[in-house]
């Protein structure tokens, strides 16, 4: 079982790169450089951000120009340069998105000698995802948590978890009194269990406070994060009333033999130190017509996922026929996550 503890770690210092020293190396301006630099920077403090980016980008170029660098090293450095200077994913053309996905796949191959399947599948028309949780059926087994960790390539060192399972005494529902770190046999007598995660609000406060617009709501209702654009200010974490977001204090670590190689750009692809992440309703699965990993793993059938726009879907039946409620309804966030009991 993955335990519910978080810790801070320091990342190792980055390696130094050699300088170019020549104007004939052919790497002055990679393809698309002018186009990217000329994009309006309405998402950051332009001067400061661009200066830092140029310094980092120069390091990538120097690495690719080094006389001692092999062909693979040069190709990797060039790929990193292009990746660093790309614009926000949400604003990319279809061609630019495809180029980014191909670049990340190639970088993984050069770094690890293997292959990943990285998707950029967009929202399906006439689909709005929603979730329902049956409090009567949850027994606190934690299978959902473990499946989520494995499916979404969450950091093993910090034991990061998107899902929280709360144990309450029957007759009470005070989250401040709930036990989120129970280490005993379940279900415990006289207790019940509730899960929380990102609720993919229709009016997400986390999106409103992001100063660089690195997080947004997709057309199918999934709230996503562009890890390449996130600056790690954690405003979104502070704004979320449901404790739905997680911060990477150190570079996430997933053993190669445990890495889920079926990935989505806005979902479970490997993250980096200093950025936010969270539940995406397993975007790499849901947009392919599958249930999120937590739904598949639940042994009691407490979790229900589906299309809110489909009048014949199970989740619509639950909402229309059960006594349902949402957390902190008074905030007006309109979470697409309902609770009910049999």
Image (tube, rainbow, N blue to C red):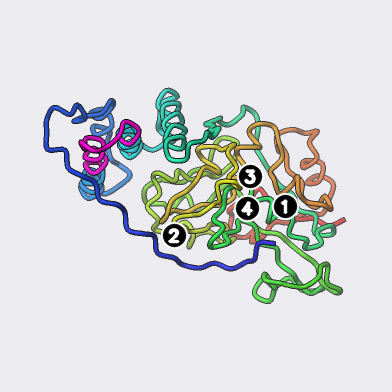
| Element type at mark 2 | loop
Farthest bottom residue? 177
Q: CA distance from mark 3 to mark 4?
A: 13 Å
For marks 1 and 3 on the same chain, the one whose residue lies earlier in the sequence = 3
Q: Which residue carries the number 3 mark? A: 281
**Tag nearer the camera, 2 or 1:** 2
| Element type at mark 3 | loop
For marks 2 and 4 on the same chain, the one whose residue lies earlier in the sequence = 4
**Tag nearer the camera, 3 or 4:** 4
Q: Nearer the viewer, residue 271 or 136?
A: 271
Given contact means CB atoms under 8 Å apart, are the residues at marks 1 and 3 in contact?
A: no
- Horizontal and vertical percent for residue 111? 43, 40
Q: Is residue 46 visible?
A: no
**Tag nearer the camera, 1 or 3:** 3
Q: Residues within 10 Å of mark 1 (few under 14, many from 20)?
A: many
Left or right of 55 on screen, residue 293? right
For marks 2 and 3 on the same chain, the one whose residue lies earlier in the sequence = 2
Q: CA distance from mark 2 to mark 1?
A: 33 Å
The part of the chain drawn in magenta is 57-73
For marks 2 and 1 on the same chain, the one whose residue lies earlier in the sequence = 2
Determine whether 275 is above or below 92 in the image: below
**Tag nearer the camera, 4 or 1:** 4
Image quadrant in which you'd find residue 95: top left
Given contact means CB atoms under 8 Å apart, are the residues at marks 3 and 4 in contact?
A: no
| Mark number, residue 338 | 1
Q: Which residue carries the number 4 mark? A: 149
Residue at figure coordinates x 47%, y 54% from the top left: 276
Q: Which residue carries the number 2 mark? A: 250
Q: CA distance from mark 2 to mark 4?
A: 17 Å
Farthest top residue? 95
Image quadrant in which you'd find residue 136: bottom right
């Amino acid at each position: 079982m993955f335990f519910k503890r978080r810790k801070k770690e320091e990342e190792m210092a980055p390696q130094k790169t050699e300088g170019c020293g020549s104007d004939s190396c052919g790497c002055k301006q990679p393809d698309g450089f002018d186009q990217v630099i000329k994009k309006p920077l309405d998402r950051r403090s332009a001067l400061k951000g661009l200066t830092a980016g140029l310094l980092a980008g120069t390091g990538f170029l120097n690495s690719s120009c080094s006389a001692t660098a092999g062909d693979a090293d040069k190709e990797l450095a060039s790929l990193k340069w292009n990746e660093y200077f790309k614009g926000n994913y949400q604003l990319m053309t279809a061609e630019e998105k495809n180029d980014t996905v191909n670049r990340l796949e190639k970088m993984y191959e050069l770094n690890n000698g293997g292959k990943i399947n990285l998707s950029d599948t967009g929202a399906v028309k006439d689909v709005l995802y929603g979730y329902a949780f049956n409090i009567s059926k949850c027994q606190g087994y934690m299978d959902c948590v473990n499946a989520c960790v494995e499916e979404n390539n969450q950091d093993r060192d910090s034991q990061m978890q998107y899902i929280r399972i709360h144990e309450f005494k029957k007759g009470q529902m005070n989250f401040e009194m709930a036990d989120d770190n129970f280490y005993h046999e379940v279900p415990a007598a006289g207790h019940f269990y509730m899960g929380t995660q990102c609720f993919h609000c229709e009016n997400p406060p986390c999106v409103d406070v992001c100063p660089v617009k690195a997080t947004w709501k997709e057309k199918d209702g999934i709230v996503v994060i562009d890890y390449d654009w996130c600056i790690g200010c954690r405003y979104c974490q502070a704004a979320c009333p449901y404790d739905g977001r997680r911060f990477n204090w150190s570079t996430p670590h997933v053993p190669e033999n445990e890495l889920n190689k079926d990935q989505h750009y806005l979902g479970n692809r490997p993250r980096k130190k200093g950025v936010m992440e969270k539940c995406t309703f397993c975007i790499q699965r849901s947009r392919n017509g599958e249930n999120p990993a937590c739904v598949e793993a639940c042994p009691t059938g407490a979790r229900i996922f589906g299309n809110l726009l489909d009048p014949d879907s199970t989740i619509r039946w639950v909402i229309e026929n059960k006594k349902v409620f949402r957390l902190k309804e008074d905030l007006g966030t309109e979470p697409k996550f309902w609770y009910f009991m049999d």
